[in-house]
Amino acid sequence: MREEHHEQTIAITDLDDHTRDLVREAGQGRLRLVVVDTDGERIAEVRRIEPPDTSDIWANYDPEAARRAWRRGTGVLRGVDVDDLLTEIKAEREQDSSGRPS
């Protein structure tokens, strides 16, 4: 059976202060909506997205995952003319781009 989705538009002015703040945070990408099944009932939870801890860049490093990623990439450049690729990369780096001058 296909589930129907209904959208409802609510004016921001019709919301209480707390809900209005949640809507703003969601618009800024700081919240996410998670649908949870609880005893056959589906409820939506709003969860705050915590910024990652950047104090220790190695805190979540998984060497086995890194090795698997390297193995999956094996052969990805097979058939590519390396000299042409390096020439293109050099040309791209010489171009000015927004926020990053050459």
Image (spheres, rainbow, N blue to C red):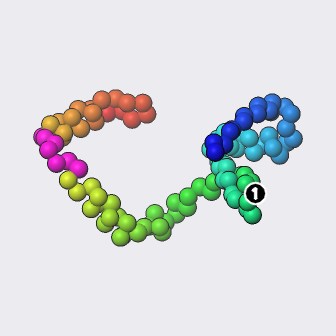
Residue behind mark 1 = 41
Q: What residue type is labelled 1?
A: Glu
**Is residue 29 shown left or right of residue 68?**
right
User: Number of labelled discs?
Assistant: 1
Picture quarter with the N terminus: top right
Q: In which quarter of the image is residue 58?
A: bottom left
| Image coordinates for residue 73, horizontal then vertical, percent | 27, 55
Q: Which residue is drawn at 16% across and 48% down?
A: 78
**Is residue 34 shown left or right of residue 54?**
right
Q: Does the magenta stretch include residue 10?
A: no
| Image coordinates for residue 11, horizontal then vertical, percent | 81, 30
Q: Which residue is drawn at 67% across and 49% down?
A: 33
Q: Quadrant of residue 92?
A: top left
Q: Residue at x 86, y 33 (%)?
A: 14
- Residue placed most toward the observer, 83 or 70: 70
- Residue placed most toward the observer, 25 or 6: 6
- Span highlighted in magenta in the image: 76-83
Picture quarter with the C terminus: top left
Q: Which residue is drawn at 21% across and 34% down?
A: 88
- Residue placed most toward the observer, 53 or 26: 26
